[in-house]
Amino acid sequence: MRETAYMLMVIATVALATFATRVLPFVFFSSREPPKLLSTIEKNLPPMILLLLLIYCLKDVQWFQPPYGAPEILTIVSVTALHVWKRNAMLSIFAGTGMYMFLVQFDVFSFLFG
Amino acid sequence: MTHESEKLFLSALRTTLPVFFGYIPLGMAFGFLLAGAGYHWIYALVMSIFVYTGAGQFIAVALLAAGAQLMEFVTVTLLINLRHSFYGLSLLDKFSGVGKVKPYLIFALTDETYALLTTARVPEGASKARFYFYISALDHLYWIAGSVLGAVLGSMLRLNLEGLTFVLAALFVVLTIEQYYASRTRFPFIAAIGAGVISLMLFSPENILLLSIVIGTLILMVHEKVTKREHADLTDAGIYPKEEK
């Protein structure tokens, strides 16, 4: 019973802290205008953050050990090429993911670096 | 459902499909972890409904296992999720006028939902509020389903899903390209590569995302100040025409 109460308290705490980070800008700028500098960079945030999210997906890649990030780089280059060519989001995403799963599950680059 | 809203729902379903394939295995990994730490699957359900944050939930399990104090949960969660404040900053306009779903949209603003909402175009003539709500709620549902599935199945299931979560990286590639086509300025991409590479080299994996966003935003601000000053200097020198007010 104490365990349950503790667990619920932890969940409530984490939930509130998470919501706080999401609601902060909306509360802060609900009654006042955002500063001018902020509103000019506001439009530039989404493209920057999306590219940073992509870079973040590479955080666990071991660049100095075989296969030197080759599956990740090759997949990203292929998805980019396919998407620029066909401009079909579903095709680019799922062909890329299938390719990546194949590359890592069958350890395709091991013969190159092994 | 009317025909119109059914069409809108299907459009949102299509938009969120990559997130489905990312959130189910990722949610399952979280469920496995929580069940492995000895907790009932009901907690996976409650956490995924009310907390709803990927990295934050994984770290919460680690803190639980370490027997952390409540204050530690607060600080760690705030630091891990501070990046969400930057998301809100760029959605102040987009979220104005969405009406009563606004609190939910803010609550459900994960990395992936942010990526979809900033890039997906609302179908012609459809309600923005409803489209955004469908996208947010579907993503939320995938996460809940994945985490409960993972917690219930525990280690019963041995599917080789290695590499499937890279679907989210592929999604970010596509959305970045779409942003590239849609935006006139190229500088945000240069700022991101600079901030991202610096962060990959200098910081530990759990800090990379927040710190790279902070650095990238600083780069954007400095760039904005500098180009504006240059522009002002050139205007004073009579090279650029003065802006009409």
Image (tube, rainbow, N blue to C red):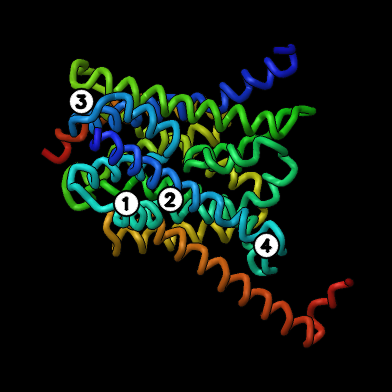
Q: Which of these two is toward me, A104 or B148?
A: B148
Tell me which residue sits at (42%, 45%) in the image: A54
Q: Residue furthest front?
A: A1
| SS category of the residue bearing label 3 | loop
Label 1 crowd (10 A; few <14 / some 14-19 / many >=20): many
**Mark 2 = which residue?**
A17
Earlier residue among tags 4 and 2? 2
The disc numbered 3 marks a residue on which chain?
A
C-alpha separation, residue under disc 1 versus residue under disc 4: 33 Å
| Residue B96, position as x, y percentages in the image | 72, 46
Earlier residue among tags 3 and 2? 2
Q: In which quarter of the image is the C terminus of chain A?
A: top left
Specify whether disc 4 shares its chain with disc 2. Answer: yes
C-alpha separation, residue under disc 4 versus residue under disc 3: 48 Å
- Amino acid at pointer 4: Ser
Q: Which mark is residue A39?
A: 4
Earlier residue among tags 4 and 3? 4
Q: Residue A106 carries which label?
A: 3
